[in-house]
Amino acid sequence: MRYAKAVYATLIVIFLVAPLLVILPLAFTSSAFLTYPIPRFSMRWFNELATNQTWNRSILNSAIIASSTTVLATVLGTLAALGLRSQDLRLKSQIRTLFLLPMVVPAVVLGVGMQAVFVPLGINSTYFSVIVAHSVIAMPFVVISVSGALAGVDRRVERAAESLGASPWRVFRLVTLPLAMPGVLSGAALAFATSLDEVVLTLFVAGPNQRTLARQMFSTLKENISPAIASAAFVIIVGTVVIAAALLLARMTPARRKGRVPKTT
Amino acid sequence: MSRAPQLKALVLIAPLLVFLGMFFVWPLITVISQAISDPAISRVLPHTASAISGWNGKDLPSDEVQAAFRADIAANTDEMAMGDVTRRLNASKSGFRSLMGKTVTALKETPEIPLVEIDKRWGDTAYWLAIRENASPYTDAYLLASIDMERGADGAIKAMPEGSSANAAIILRTLWTSALVTLCCLLIGLPYAMVTASVTGWKRALLLGAVLLPLWTSLLVRTAAWMILLQENGLINQALMGLGLTNGPLALIYNRFGVVLAMTHVLLPFMVLPIYSVLLTVPGNLMGAAASLGAHPVRAFLRVLLPLSLRGVISGMLLVFMSAIGYYITPALIGGATDQMISSVIAFYATGSANWSMAAALGLILLVLTLVLYALYNRLSREPGQAR
Amino acid sequence: MAESFIRFDKVTKDYGTVRVVEDLDLDIARGEFVSLLGPSGSGKTTLLMMLAGFETVTKGAIILDGQRLNGVPTYKRDMGVVFQNYALFPHMNIARNVAFPLEMRGTAKSDIAARVKRALDMVQLGHLSDRMPGQLSGGQQQRVALARSLVFEPRVVLMDEPLGALDKQLREQMQLDIRELHHRLGLTIIFVTHDQDEALTMSDRIAVFDKGQIQQCATPRQVYDHPANRFVAEFIGETNLLPGKVTGVDGSKIALTMPDGSVLRADGATGLAVGDAALLSLRPERIDLHGPNDAPAGLNSLRGEVADTIYQGDHLRIVVTTPAGRIIARVPRKAAEWPNGASVALGFRPADGWIIAP
């Protein structure tokens, strides 16, 4: 029984993780095909990404769009999460549901609707339309993550600050915001990753000039499986990890690091 | 007294509310209205449309209706829109193309001329019926068409002729594929969640990590990984042939097998995590208690653990099914032509053939289905007490 | 009472349709230590939160030193608040936590450092000023919270069950420390607790809360010995309540006739008249046990039968059934013991009983 359990768990772990491990080494293949065994280690396909106009334009676009989306979604989502914290707000749970709905609505349906709204306004196929579309579906992650962090902020700590003479604005700046910062930052990282990975909405609201890395990967995958895909996947993974790491580092303020001094007594 | 905090909260959420109103709610409303609206006739012939609604359909329409029609034609300046109207009316009743052309020209010259004098066909109620039928700004034609139905000449709903539309088949296929994926996720995920909940320490961390890792990785990257694994000379086929299990490569990709496999991988975390979190709330010694009371492990599982984890199982199934029916990328890349799901068809109507109304109608069906499932899921996760 | 420093004037608080505090009056003098004692939901914490400004007052007024506080935001009230969970700022070290109220008041930098040091030394934590709150034990954190609430010399110090999260030994130590600080610094302290021992130990006066109203507000001795009503008698300490009928009133001396016809005499609350139903509250430790015929003259005496004897280490609890009801007596270890079923006489002085309205 115990043995069967271990075998089963191992098999499923392999099923879950192996595909992700398989694709990364292929980014460094010298072959023209995405297959094993890899003949030789080579930077050939990264070179392709860097020099090919279509690929490097799409990487630049993704960088622009994902960072703008991150800023927009994080600001809107954080403000909303702060508002949702109020006990006095009427229709609170309905509003929260509305905020989370973009995660649920099928992207294709939203894409059709966005295109139908954006085209007559003459704003479809612009950076604006893509950033807005990505922000709509990235925002729920920020709301969830910041709400979670705020739920962990003890109201009594804020009350203590107020009783010690801090005005509401100072309570927010000196106590609430610093304590909720981890949630804001992980929300921002999730927003960035969401935008980086977004394909379906992009198909509808982006023009050729806003083609993102994910969109470019999608069409390349449809046409032919070139190793440039593995290199692009590598870039996406590294991009996500770098952003997450940077945000994590930013979170470790000097005060926090000082706080890690081991106990002496 | 609670006005001030309420106002503060409103000010904080207002930006996002406005943003979502413009870029989320409005697009969805547009989808809905596009799915059910048919403004071509009512826009060009507004007075006719309102006048003809009072007509009994048997005698010739009254002078007011005819006058409204003449006025509408005379007032129109949009040739393209009139062309649209003609095409639409012609589709309902052939002969309208020549009739409308003749009528427009005649009315341009002498606006007051009685219609029957322009063409005696205006004395035939069949033509007026066609106008009345198309006059409403709303239509259920697209919604019906999205499930392979239509209205006959008598207005009754009937099935479209065999083979003229594959929408219903695609909806069924979407539901079937999603059900299959849900089942696979359940069969793999339920035992996995139970194993995860039963171990501790690094083992639990590893098992949970293995579920969370794919969740954090790009969907596109995961799909690409499966394409690489499943392709004709991919690792799996290489391994199978290397082991001598098959002689030639198996067709693993561009078919239903590949779609279900890849979607199961992608959606498995949504099954494991809800079950796992429910299992965590079940005291660990219950199985031991059942055993001490004389229950065989299998019976103890069926009678104790399974009922207790049911809420997580149902949540997980709803979540997986709800996500699966809206999937686009994975079927589009890993499926063959006969594995496309409803999202692909919507995308095709919207971007490929520019049939916005059909895209919207199918989208509306998908939207409603998803929201109903989500409401169920929400209800389930909010009222733990009533879910048994 | 001396001049009123804090005055609650007909204060009412509603949450929606629920009335948590009703028409409450309370005056507190400068330098006084007042405990608000009561079961949870009795309104004591709500009253404190209204004083601190965390909750609004539905009706009535709170006046501090002649200034009406209604509508004054918390941060302008100049009150130190100590919370049960300490409520230290987890992202600031100890020194910065304590400096916080001084920074808010724009105190000069050089001055801040000196005052923070003095405050931390006062609670014997000067050596930990660089630590983060998470690295401190519960008792240390509470002392930091105390230093933080005192460093800016607030007009009033409010404590909301501050010792509730500490273990017994630490709690008793802190009780003495706070009592000492109160005397040394002449602080006005309002202290919310549901622990009667804590209230008895520390307070100048105890306000006993129930159902949003103060049932009694008096010194610990009065509250224990002369409870105003049945709730107070039962809530504070253990007591035997024996129903009877008032058959004589002579000033504060009351004669109570028990159902079996015997007459007991004790002090009692004012307002009782002959013919009223009343309760005799008899503390277990005020009862002596004698042989059935040995009851000393001049004492009240009740005959009964020993039903059970419970050994409690430093004392015995003896359950006696009497015609007036079941009575628990608490007697010292060195007193004589009786077997179950033995006839005994329970004796108590009139001053040791207390008669209240039922």
Image: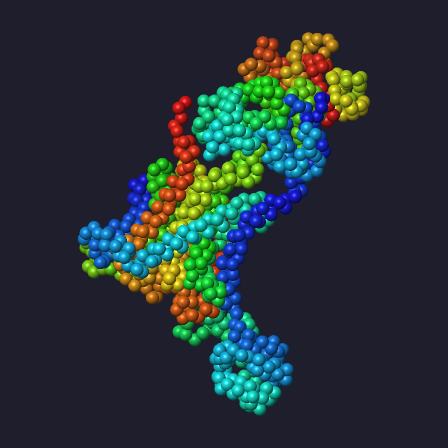
Depicted C114 relative to depicted A130: above or below: above
Q: Is residue C324 visible?
A: no
The front one of B385 and C158 is C158
The front one of C145 and C120 is C120
Q: Position of residue B338 (x, y in %)?
A: 34, 66
For the point 54% across and 71% down, the residue is B138
Q: Position of residue B7 (x, y in %)?
A: 60, 47
For the point 55% across and 77% down, the residue is B44
What number of labels is visible? Answer: 0
Q: Position of residue B100 (x, y in %)?
A: 52, 84
Depicted C259 relative to depicted A88: above or below: above
Depicted A138 relative to depicted C115: above or below: below
Q: Is residue B199 visible?
A: yes
Depicted A243 relative to depicted C326: above or below: below
Lateral position of residue B92 relative to residue C344, left or right: left
Residue A210, image quadrant: bottom left
For the point 48% across and 43% down, the residue is A148
Lateral position of residue A48 relative to residue C282, left or right: left
Residue C184, image quadrant: top right
For the point 48% across and 73% down, the residue is B150
Q: How is the image coloured?
A: rainbow
- For the N terminus of chain B, the quadrant is top right
The front one of C261 and B264 is B264
The front one of C129 and C112 is C112
Q: Position of residue B300 (x, y in %)?
A: 41, 42
